[in-house]
Image (spheres, rainbow, N blue to C red):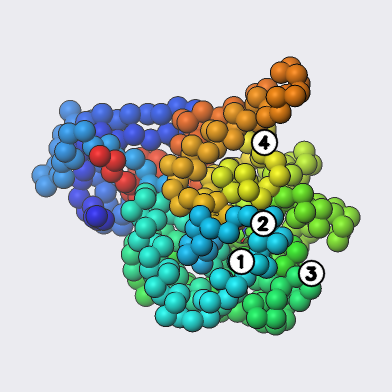
Amino acid sequence: MRVSLRGRALRGDFVHAPVRGDIEVLRDHVIRVGEDGMIASVRPVADGVPEGTVQMPAGHLVLPGFVDLHIHAPQYPQLGLALDEPLEVWLGKYTFPLESKYADLDFAREAYGTLVRDLLAGGTTTALYFATVHREATQLLAEICLEQGQRGLVGKVVMDNHETSPDYYRDETAADAVADTRAVIDHIRALPGNDRVLPVVTPRFIPSCTDEALAGLGALARECGCHVQTHCSESDWAHGYALERYGHTDTAALDGFGLLTRKTVLAHSVFLTDPDMAMVREAGAGVAHCALSNMYFANAVFPLRRALEKDVHVGLGTDISGGPSSSMFEACRTTVQASRLLETGVDPNVPRETRGHSGATIDMKTAFHLATVGGGKALELPVGIFRPGFHFDAIVVD
Ligand code: GUN
Ligand code: FE
């Protein structure tokens, strides 16, 4: 069930993680919400309870809604399926055929409607979505987010490289790709009553795009001031592809095309070098850590602790359907679990002293912080904390 508390107040126990590594419990507090949906005040009950305040039942906790910082909306129908191939095979064998079906708007409406409803029920109140190459179906996803009340950031996927994208599923030219992206941005920004859905410039990843498209999208992102999302250095293959094409990394190439900005989110980024991390930090860009998906496609564990120590913005993503769970609770758990494998190492034939990487462990409090506040920071959106000036995007756990 979804309720709006605009112009009202809520009394109960609130739990959030404004500081990384810590959980703050606001027992028996009152949060007043403005007509604009923003938090107006957070006070203990002793300071007074306004008339008409909604009272949470005992034993219920109010948490900030989750931010899923990387999710492929069209891949929901194959959630939990088709994970028997490496990334570069999986795309052509399963994923492009599925995504191509979204040319059919009836199919798209049904699939996207189900996805957004399920995500909200699971606690994802903000999602940074890859849609498909189709202009109309991408616009439909934005409209469904708005209708259902989800803070959606939605991107038309660009893939115009004929060498890596099939005839039946691609942008015909770089100019088409940029023009369609611009049309989607304009459409989303003009949606009546749109106070929460944002457009995103979305080159799928470097192998899918020509230099002309990447340069055009970089210029468009600057002109429109939009968010940007892409996959970066996800696997040995993807990382190696950019090195071969450019003689430098994905991160450096994206930066060269103007695609590394304060509002850029790089999915995975498992193979970032130290100079790459410094570039990401310098740009103020963020990383969407997708621990579960990385177990299938990445060939390695993202050094999350290293990224945090370097002050890189990091949030968590499900990466549906590379990650076979739509739950951000699960994303928190797998973040913790993967970090422990990185810490200890995995090969019993290697002596304990050299098996792992000490200092890699992430605890659940940190994972919860990243899944809420971390995602909000990466997107430069005031969500994830119960504090005046933040959106009151919240879930109730019974
Ligand atoms: N790289 C390019 N496209 C994709 C995708 O759909 N999923 C994942 N995990 N990686 C990608
Ligand atoms: Fe992905």
Q: Is residue 219 left or right of residue 248?
A: left
Disc 3 to disc 4: CB gap under 8 Å? no
Number of the label disc, if any, that sits on residue 85:
2
In this figure, which residue is indicated by the disc labeled 1? 94
Whichever of labels 2 and 3 marks the residue nearer the N terminus, that label is 2
Q: Quadrant of residue 156?
A: bottom right
How far apart are labels 3 and 4 at the CA level?
29 Å
Which secondary structure lies at badge 1?
helix
Whichever of labels 2 and 1 marks the residue nearer the N terminus, that label is 2
How far apart are labels 2 and 3 at the CA level?
28 Å
Looking at the rendered image, the quarter that the C terminus falls into is: top left
> What residue is shown at x 17% (from left), y 28% (from top)?
46
Name the amino acid, label 4. Pro
Whichever of labels 4 and 2 marks the residue nearer the N terminus, that label is 2
Which residue is more in the foreground, 233 or 81? 81
Which secondary structure lies at badge 3?
helix
In this figure, which residue is indicated by the disc labeled 4? 303
Name the amino acid, label 1. Tyr
> What residue is shown at x 61% (from left), y 59% (from top)?
229
Which residue is more in the foreground, 208 or 337? 337
Disc 2 to disc 1: CB gap under 8 Å? yes
